[in-house]
Image: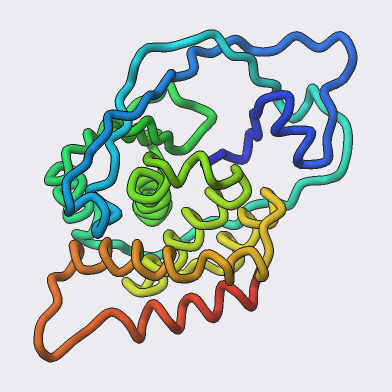
Amino acid sequence: MPSAKRVAGFWTWKNLGRSVKAGQKGIRILAPIVGVRRKKDADASQDITKQNERVLLGFRNAYVFDISQTDGVDLPALNEVTGDPGENIDRLAAFLKSKGIQLVYSEKIAPALGMSYGGRIAILPGQSKAEEFSTLVHEAAHEMMHKAERRTATTKTVRETEAEAVAFVVGKAIGLVTGSASADYINLYHGNASLLAESLEVVQQTANVILAALEPPTEDSATEPQTSEADAELAEAA
């Protein structure tokens, strides 16, 4: 999930309608090299949280460019998520730990707010609690949906649209005020309502898994109506 500072790779800027200015030098970073550890058990084919495991193999040199080094179409300003997530950050962290996903806080990932490495999530410290929770849900969604075979079958636009849709649905369900933040983010990656509709099933499934971890379901309550309402609002906003 990017921050307002807007740093991205050469081709990402191209996809966003901007071009790196001639003569600009990229900022060298260490990008993770991630591989797949195959899982063949029956649970992996039925539960998205138990699919093939992504493992960190090493790092490679990569270059990114700040928005000031590019020309092209204006990018939307991203509104912030507000509200109080309460104990849900701790509950989500405990859920991730139970799935073998490490959570760390690191200033080294700036200007990104969060990063998903496959079995490891890094969050930028200093965010508001609402933004921290939304970022954590976004990266958790990447871990659950995009670290197995499905990653190779989707584009970056699809992956970012799906992860932010999950963050919107979960945030809405626990009472956060999202405004147009998620829609702005999805538009940044050229996502739209049509693309979101195609991903609605996996978005709902992933959001429900996370919501169940935040508040274990009881006989008297269910999260399905909440997620369905939030999905409809997000599709309309996109």
Q: Is residue 41 left or right of residue 54?
A: left
Looking at this rendering, what residue extends furthest in the bottom direction?
A: 220
Q: Quadrant of the C terminus?
A: bottom right
Question: What is the image's colouring?
Answer: rainbow
Residue 184 occupies quadrant: bottom right
Q: Is residue 136 left or right of residue 28?
A: left
Query: In the image, is residue 131 above or below residue 151?
Result: below
Query: Observer-nearest residue: 50 or 41?
Result: 41
Residue 231 percent location from the top left of the image: 49, 76
- Judging depth in this view, the residue of 171 and 31 nearest the camera is 31
- Residue 144, placed above or below residue 213: above
Q: Residue at x 29, y 39 (%)?
A: 52
Figure quadrant of residue 149: top left
**Closest to the observer: 114 or 9?**
9
Is residue 176 visible in the rendered structure shown here? no
Q: Is residue 232 visible?
A: yes
Residue at 34%, 15% in the rendered image: 57
Q: Is residue 59 left or right of residue 102?
A: right
Observer-nearest of 16 and 78: 16
Q: Position of residue 85 (x, y in %)?
A: 30, 62
Residue name at image x 30 percent, y 26 percent: 55
| Residue 84 point in image, percent of width and height | 32, 63
Residue 219 image position (x, y, % from top left): 9, 88
| Vertical side of 168 occupied by 140: above or below | above
Numbered label tally: 0
In-image side of 180 versus 20 (left or right): left
- Residue beneath the point at 35% across and 26% down: 106
